[in-house]
Image (spheres, helix red, strand yellow):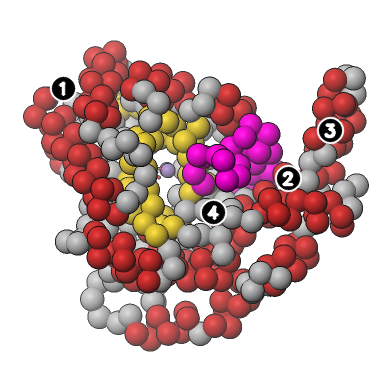
Amino acid sequence: MTSQSGFAAIADRLEGQAIELPSWAFGNSGTRFKVFGTAGTPRSVKEKIADAATVHRFTGLAPSVALHIPWDKVDDYAALSAYAEDHGVRLGTINSNTFQDDDYKFGALTHVDAKIRQKAIDHHLECLDIMDATGSRDLKIWLADGSNYPGQADLRGRQDRLAESLATIYERLGADQRLVLEYKFFEPAFYHTDVPDWGTAYAQVTALGDRAVVCLDTGHHAPGTNIEFIVMQLLRLGKLGSFDFNSRFYADDDLIVGAADPFQLFRILFEVIRGGGYGPDSEVAFMLDQCHNVEEKIPGQIRSVLNVQEMTARALLVDSDALEAAQESGDVLGAHQVLMDAFYTDVRGDLAEWRASRGLPADPMRAYAESGYQAEIEATRVGGTQLSWT
Ligand code: PSV
Ligand code: MN
Ligand code: MN
């Protein structure tokens, strides 16, 4: 068993952990059946940022917020950045959106019509302009492109057009900016998706160059997929750019990370750490991609970042020397036990102390509930339109 001194040995490595929050997690969301409204929901981009900053204030874990364009469109991005900084956070990844325009019914960056492809490319160039103003590093591209019926589309032609469109966008990246391509194997297209898997994303970004990398969304794989293997492989190839963390029972459920399968989150984080994807020298960005349909949104985000922190601590506790020795001597059960000992270690008490020693609330969920922030936003955010994620 890992002892109390085990936590002391890894405590410093928790310093500086950063998990980016998605602005859309604070808006109302739901399914195609119903979007439920919640009192206190932000009516503006600034109010979303204020809520994200609140999550950071209570946890110390979420220093940046990802924006989604055009949902978070404003006139003055430099001013929005300054607003975020005044609230103790900064603007992070810019997410493009080519899935809500009639022109994109049959694709965006892959469309057969050059005019529509150009429109989609121009949207990404606009996102890059926004990144110049906000100082953001990452342009994240998730495409809804795909088809529903065999024979509907020329799969190869679409892949070639995608490569060409991405190359045009990549050319315009600034020296410190990255293009991050996200894959997903289904939905909204159900027969084929143009970037369905890590292999396709890898092939596309590799053709672009060093500043193009892959985003792994934990909800975007077929059930049963060994996600930690993909993490290992992308890190090994130097192409793991970022995570969209969430959890799922069935499809792209976007539930709270670590809620459905904490052991899977542990296994993923173990491979991240083992592969050099964690810590100050790593360029792998941790982000949440979640929606809170029926639970309160701010505590939902607080719970999420705490879950990531908790599983990171447990993954750091793996005795890597003992693991390596067991692996090399063919001790199957011994090696398995080393991993499970760390996974089963309850670090919640140690983490509470760790937080308190850094001036953070020992129990951020409780501190938020007692803070009065929720009552205040419910009372003051009246009028205007509550934002929803679509
Ligand atoms: C759609 O599946 C999606 O959830 C992708 O994961 C994106 O990251 C997100 O929407 C925001 O565009
Ligand atoms: Mn995602
Ligand atoms: Mn998704």
Give how far apart the Cα atoms at labels 4 and 1 are.
Answer: 40 Å
Residue receiving disc 1: 112
Label 3 environment density (alpha carbons within 10 Å; few <14, some 14–19, many ≥20): few
The circle drawn on residue 316 is 2
At numbered mark 4, what does the secondary structure look like: helix, strand or loop? loop
Q: Earlier in the sequence, mark 1 or mark 3?
A: 1
Q: How many marks?
A: 4
Q: Residue at x 80, y 54 (%)?
A: 7
User: What is the quadrant of the C terminus in the image?
Assistant: bottom left
**Nearer to me, 41 or 182:** 182
Q: CA distance from mark 3 to mark 2?
A: 12 Å
Mark positioned earlier in the residue sequence (4 or 1): 4
Q: Amino acid at mark 4?
A: Ala
Q: Is residue 250 above or below residue 238?
A: below
Tell me where residue 212 appears, x and y as whole percent. Answer: 38, 29
Which stretch did the figure color magenta? 259-286
Q: Real-space Cα distance between discs 2 and 4? A: 16 Å
Foreground disc of the pair 1, 3? 3
Residue under label 3, please give it.
Answer: 321
Mark 3–mark 4 CB contact (< 8 Å): no
Which of the pair 300/186 is nearer the observer? 300
> Magenta span has 23?
no
Whole-angstrom CA distance, mark 1 to mark 3, is: 54 Å
Q: For residue 167, which quarter of the picture?
A: top left
